[in-house]
Amino acid sequence: MAFFHFSLVFFISSILLFNHSVKCDNDEEDVLFQGVNEYRASLNLTTLTKNENANCLAEQIADQFKNQPCTNTTGANTVPGTEPQFANYPELLTKCHLNISNTRDGSIMPACVPGLVPGIVLTNFTKSLYSQNLNDTKFTGIGIGSEDNWIVVVLTTTTSDGSFLPDTSGANFISTIGLVYCLMLLLVGNIIMF
Ligand SMILES: *[C@@H]1O[C@H](CO)[C@@H](O)[C@H](O)[C@H]1NC(C)=O
Ligand SMILES: *[C@@H]1O[C@H](CO)[C@@H](O)[C@H](O)[C@H]1NC(C)=O
Ligand SMILES: *[C@@H]1O[C@H](CO)[C@@H](O)[C@H](O)[C@H]1NC(C)=O
Ligand SMILES: *[C@@H]1O[C@H](CO)[C@@H](O)[C@H](O)[C@H]1NC(C)=O
Ligand SMILES: *[C@@H]1O[C@H](CO)[C@@H](O)[C@H](O)[C@H]1NC(C)=O
């Protein structure tokens, strides 16, 4: 009986958590990820692999742009080797356990597309100056974040200056737990659905 109650509570709280607080991934981001790699394949370039830390930074930066109109690109800085002009950029890096010395060679590319219509989002990257970075063989990893009408792509390299490897610390342990937790909830969600 006690086990039954425990199961019931676990079941209900899983549904609540699953519905309200877990957002493991996002459709527009996945579509863009695939689109960018198809574009790279068409140019015979290597596939970009997902980089969790770049992903985290992309989310943080998208969060800075959210609520800003598309015309306002204040803070955007698309030139590799220069940092975005957000006053709180160091803070955003810290949140993602990154150190500026490992992100300098990366490239941060924000775009604003009302409604984030997938086809338009992709051409925003492949048919603009951003294509210069997508065409570049030095980039090997990618992170994508979106908020509102904004979507941010962060490219990473294999060199230490652009690896987006975490700053030392045990903070990664927490994000691993977070990931496992997210996967577990997904699993529970699937069990409930089927
Ligand atoms: C990609 O490689 C294929 C086969 O080697 C070649 O036919 C094609 O022209 C290349 N495309 C580009 C854009 O370099
Ligand atoms: C543009 O964005 C910056 C940075 O978020 C903000 O300080 C500024 O007020 C915005 N300007 C307009 C016109 O929205
Ligand atoms: C980043 O890393 C460099 C080299 O490891 C170190 O000297 C610097 O203090 C670090 N910066 C921050 C903000 O942690
Ligand atoms: C994205 O595309 C829209 C429509 O083509 C354009 O107005 C906008 O400037 C583009 N943004 C970027 C960052 O390329
Ligand atoms: C990137 O490569 C494509 C295909 O070769 C080309 O059309 C485009 O102009 C290049 N972008 C830049 C900025 O050179």
Image (cartoon, rainbow, N blue to C red):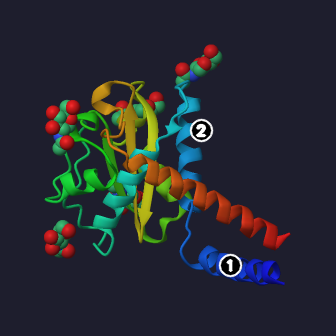
Is residue 186 in sight in this rendering? yes
Secondary-structure class at tag 2 = helix
Asked whether 8 or 14 is in front, the reply is: 8
Residue holding disc 1: 15
Q: Which quadrant of the view contains residue 71?
A: bottom left
Q: Which quadrant of the view contains residue 181?
A: bottom right
Residue, x 73% and y 69% (percent of image)? 189
Q: Amino acid at mark 1?
A: Ile
Residue 126: image tag: none
Q: Amino acid at mark 2?
A: Glu
Residue holding disc 2: 38
Residue, x 28% and y 65% (percent of image)? 64
Is residue 127 in sight in this rendering? no
Residue 14 shown left or right of residue 52 in the figure: right
Residue 34 shown left or right of residue 9 in the figure: left
Query: Is disc 1 surrounded by few (<14), some (14 to 19) or many (20+) residues within 10 Å?
Result: some
Q: Quadrant of ligand 2?
A: bottom left
Q: Residue furthest left?
A: 87
Earlier sequence position, callout 1 versus callout 2: 1
State whether residue 30 is above or below residue 70: above
Residue 149 lies, in percent from the top left, at 41, 69
State whether residue 182 is above or below residue 124: below
